Amino acid sequence: MSFGYDSNIIYSDTAEVTQGSLESDARSLCALLSAERSTPDSKDQPIILVAHSLGGLVCTEAIVLGERNATGDSVQSIAKRVNGIVFLGTPFAGLNLAKWGDIIRAIFNVVRKTD
């Protein structure tokens, strides 16, 4: 299964700027996985996630949320079945260039809204 999320940061119409977050993307991932695992045979199967870049942060957030949520919640039920995660280029420590991105975003916001 493949999971996608909106990673665009620039929109031509300011009304279309998403207010997404790692938490909302993680919840969406868990809801989708929960729906995919609706048969009794698949509910107990282990999950191995392969994630790239921001997707790794989304997967990590799903595990963290799973520890905090009540038993029976789709996030908690998926998180407890994850047996492994392969991270490919996930920026856990952030980027040294991130401060420059904030400066550029502030300048660009004058012309066009960014997320």
Image (cartoon, rainbow, N blue to C red):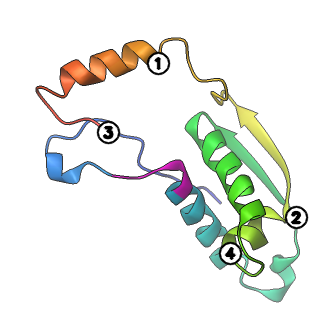
Q: Pointer 1 and pointer 4: residues touching (CB < 8 Å)?
A: no
Q: Earlier in the sequence, mark 2 or mark 3?
A: 2
- SS at mark 2 in the image: loop
Q: Tell me how far mark 4 sits from mark 3, CA to CA.
A: 28 Å
The numbered disc on residue 74 is: 4
Q: Tell me how far mark 3 sits from mark 1, CA to CA.
A: 14 Å
Q: Earlier in the sequence, mark 1 or mark 4?
A: 4
- SS at mark 4 in the image: helix
Q: Earlier in the sequence, mark 2 or mark 1?
A: 2
Q: Which residues are magenta?
A: 19-23
Residue 15, position as x, y percentages in the image: 16, 53
Residue position marked by numbered label 1 in the rendering: 98
Can you say which quadrant of the picture contains the N terminus? bottom right
Residue position marked by numbered label 2 in the rendering: 46
Amino acid type indicated by mark 1? Ala
Report the predominant secondary structure element of the magenta stretch: loop
Q: Return the residue found at the far bottom.
A: 40
In the rendered image, the vertical position of residue 95 relative to residue 66, given as above or below: above
Circle 2 or circle 4, nearest the eye: 4
Q: Is residue 111 left or right of residue 64?
A: left
User: Residue at the spot x=50%, y=59% of the render?
Assistant: 24
User: Residue at the spot x=47%, y=50% of the render?
Assistant: 21
Residue position marked by numbered label 3 in the rendering: 115
- SS at mark 3 in the image: loop
Amino acid type indicated by mark 4? Ser
User: Residue at the spot x=84%, y=65% of the render?
Assistant: 80
Q: Is residue 20 magenta?
A: yes
Circle 2 or circle 1, nearest the eye: 1
Residue 49, position as x, y percentages in the image: 75, 50
Q: Tell me how far mark 2 sits from mark 4, CA to CA.
A: 15 Å
